[in-house]
Amino acid sequence: MAKVLGMSKVYDLGYRNHRMDNISIQELRARLIFLFRLLKVDTIVTYDPWGHYEENPDHYITAMAVESARWMSGGRLDYPEHFEAGLTPHSVIERYYFARGPQLVNRIVETSQTIDRKIEANAAIVTQGPGGEAGARLKKSLADKGKYLPILGNDDETANRNYIKHFVLDKDSQRLRGVPSDREIGEPYGLDWAERFHYIGPEASVLKEYIDEHAIDKKP
């Protein structure tokens, strides 16, 4: 999946699926602070730490750890040993938070130009649903009953991709992912495909502007 998305590096922290609520959140936070400082991370995309009704403990534990690590990584008081190792404080500038339940949504991002890559990335996740090889399995299940669904095409690869595009991301999105269809999200804005986020960007300071306007030369 990382290769499909064009990522040049992946850090596997080694935590078990559906067991994140058993780990120390302080440990996870510390590891994330180290990575934020090491990589000079400017943008993070993760589950919304203020999202409601999230069922998966992996999601809400990760969200809380990421947000608290983001908040602490720009300071000089936490983990000073990092600085002796050559790292420096670094603040994350942008946050894109998403949730499966009700949340504050203040940014819509068009994905029409990247939808094929998103489909391919979902198809690469064969160990978990709702993408992976689900289309091929559905195609075979129907064939065993003497049925055929034209939208799935004639081969397994096409079946997987079309299942993800037309069902996982669109027609059956609410049931399979717990979020509205990517098409439905984009429709009010005249977009073919889109995603929604709780976006938090850089906070502008008025200090420099105030100094420029009010500072005077100090008398000798």
Image (cartoon, rainbow, N blue to C red):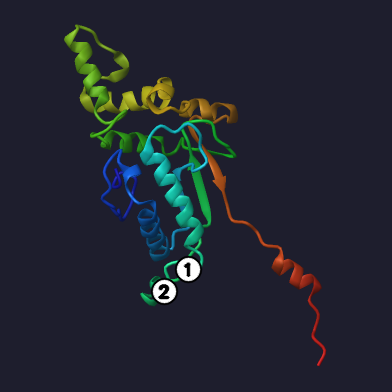
x 52%, y 53%: residue: 94
Q: Of residues 130 and 122, which is closer to you in this image?
A: 130
Q: How far is the residue under mark 1 from the one under mark 2?
A: 8 Å
- As helix, strand or loop, the secondary structure at mark 2 comes to helix
Q: Above or below — where is 110 with respect to 94?
A: above
* Left or right: 109, with 166 as reference point: right
Residue 212 lies, in percent from the top left, at 75, 72
Residue 153 lies, in percent from the top left, at 27, 19
Label 1 belongs to which residue? 89
Res 154 visible:
no
Within 10 angstroms of label 1, few (less than 14), some, or many (20 or more) residues?
Answer: many
Res 156 visible:
yes
Within 10 angstroms of label 2, few (less than 14), some, or many (20 or more) residues?
Answer: few
x 29%, y 13%: residue: 149
- As helix, strand or loop, the secondary structure at mark 1 comes to loop
Q: For the N terminus, give its image quadrant.
A: top left
Q: Of residues 43 and 155, which is closer to you in this image?
A: 43
Q: Residue furthest bottom?
A: 220
Which label sits on residue 17? none
x 30%, y 29%: residue: 131
x 70%, y 69%: residue: 208
Indicate the quadrant where residue 86 lies.
bottom left
Label 2 belongs to which residue? 83
- In primary-sequence order, the first of circles 1 and 2 is 2
Q: Amino acid at mark 2?
A: Phe
Q: Amino acid at mark 1?
A: Pro
Q: For the C terminus, give its image quadrant.
A: bottom right
Residue 80 lies, in percent from the top left, at 43, 72
Residue 20 lies, in percent from the top left, at 33, 44
Q: Above or below — where is 208 with respect to 127?
A: below
Numbered label tally = 2
Q: Are marks 1 and 2 in contact (CB under 8 Å)?
A: yes
